[in-house]
Amino acid sequence: MSKSLCSKELYCSFLKVTSQRYSSLALSEVSPFEISHDSISRWLEEAKCQPKDIWSEVKDCVLGSESGVIVADETVLNKNRSNKIELVRWQYSGTVHDILRGIGMLNFLWVDENRDVCPMDFRIWEPKEDGQTKNDQFREMLKIAKRREVKPEAVVADSWYGSLDNCKCIRDLGWNWVIGLRKNRVVNKGEKLEKLLIPESGLKVHLRGYGFITVFRFVAKNGRTDYFGTNIENVSKDKIVSLVGKRWQIEVFHKELKQTCGLECSQARTSRSQRNHIVLSVLSWIKKQELRRKQNITFYRQKWNIIKQSVAQQLEYELLVT
């Protein structure tokens, strides 16, 4: 069987409609034409799907927005039961709040003024292959976004990406930033943020090696305290709340990728196969997002609509035979 029978369109459509099984074998069993699972596996290993394929799909949406922010965050693809996948390494997962075996994925998400979202770019964290840290990848993606003429209102990220080099990189690109700062971050003349009295309107402090920024303090209902800094001049707390609130969209994006697009489900062993599967999972998310925009149908409802009739027919049969 020719390996060329498999394609991006077939694989993405499969990820879009399947609910439980995401393997090459499952695709071969439901394909509208005869194709072996070995052929699909070979295609997945030899194809060259890249993050720039995602940008090709969404650039009109991003560049056509009147206003929007870049939200950066990472997620870990849980591979705890996988021992032979090349990209898997031990790392901390914020989802399970523990160390697990998985694949680290840094995502850039575009969130516009209506909170409509588009994935822009991503990187897989594998220092053995590319020799980069997550912060190196973060700055590389920022520079690529600049070359693509993206014009965000701000770059929003959590404290993991609050390093001095990252903040200076965003400033040098001519952009604003709103980024989390750890409570022990030193400002002014050796003072820690947690020791400062920060009013509701924010406090201007001197960040060593950078210059003056404004810091805001947020206290959650459970008592957790977070600090966010920004280089935006004369900004109100309400504006910062609005910008920080858009970070939640990337959490939803990660959840939908994993639960409805099979992001974590490939058991392919090679790095190239895993990278291709991840790109194709994001492309299938984009297809589902288009349907959500047009018909106002959630991702989970889309999945249910596909299998609803089959479940109804099986239920009717079960009642007849009992």
Image (cartoon, rainbow, N blue to C red):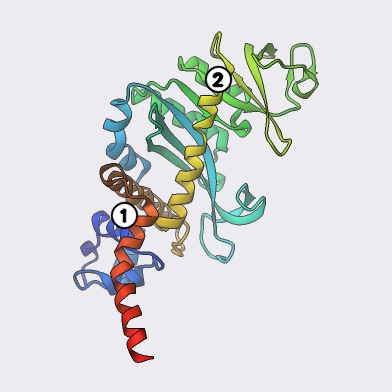
Q: Which mark is residue 238?
A: 2
Position of residue 125 measured from the top left corner of the image (x, y, whole percent): 53, 44
Residue 65, located in which quarter of the rendered image? top left
Above or below, comparing residue 90 to residue 164 in the picture: below
Say if residue 297 shows up in the picture.
yes
User: Where is the N terminus found, in terms of image quarters?
Assistant: bottom left
The residue sitting at the bottom extreme is 321
Question: What kind of residue is marked 1?
Answer: Ala
User: Where is the C terminus found, in terms of image quarters?
Assistant: bottom left
Residue 60, located in which quarter of the rendered image? top left
Residue 257 in the figure: left or right of residue 36:
right
Say if residue 276 shows up in the picture.
no
Position of residue 80 measured from the top left corner of the image (x, y, whole percent): 59, 62
The local secondary structure at tag 2 comes to helix
Front-lying residue, 300 or 65:
300
Q: Which mark is residue 47?
A: 1
